[in-house]
């Protein structure tokens, strides 16, 4: 894998980590500020948070595997 490919994977991991953190913030705000009134939003927000974290995890695993192969 080329250096450019590794940099692209690193960029993807950072982007996904930021998106996961933002979504975690949305979940946190819902839990801290709006429950129990907004309980109807809980499943959708939790699923979006899970999906964002999973996307980060998958990108991070790709990066780790590529980094090990390059070493």
Image (spheres, grey):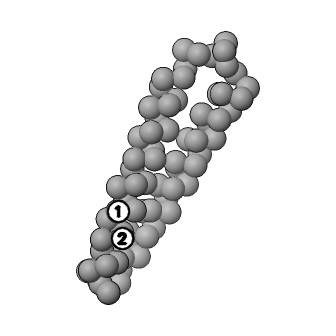
Q: Which mark is residue 50?
A: none
The residue indicated by pointer 2 is 64
Query: Image quarter for residue 24?
Result: top right
Q: Is 39 displayed left or right of 12 in the figure?
A: right
Q: Could you say where residue 41 lies in the image, as x and y percent from the top left?
A: 55, 20
Task: Tell which residue pokes out farthest to the right in this image.
Answer: 33
Q: Could you say where residue 57 lies in the image, as x and y percent from the top left?
A: 40, 54
Q: Which mark is residue 61?
A: 1
| Depth order, front residue of 31/9 | 31
The residue drawn where x is 41% and y is 40% is 51
Q: Image height check: is 37 above or below 57?
A: above
Q: Residues within 10 Å of mark 2 (few under 14, many from 20)?
A: some
Q: Are marks 2 and 1 in contact (CB under 8 Å)?
A: yes
Q: Image height check: is 2 above or below 30?
A: below
The residue drawn where x is 58% and y is 49% is 21
| Secondary structure of the residue carrying numbered label 2 | helix
| Depth order, front residue of 15/51 | 51
| Secondary structure of the residue carrying numbered label 1 | helix
- In space, the residues marked 2 and 1 are separated at their CA atoms by 5 Å
């Amino acid at each position: 894998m080329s250096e450019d490919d590794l940099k692209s994977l690193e960029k993807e991991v950072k982007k996904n980590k930021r998106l996961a953190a933002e979504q975690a913030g949305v979940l946190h705000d819902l839990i801290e500020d709006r429950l129990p009134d907004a309980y109807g939003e809980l499943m959708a927000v939790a699923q979006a948070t899970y999906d964002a974290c999973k996307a980060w995890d998958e990108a991070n695993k790709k990066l780790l595997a590529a980094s090990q192969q390059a070493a």
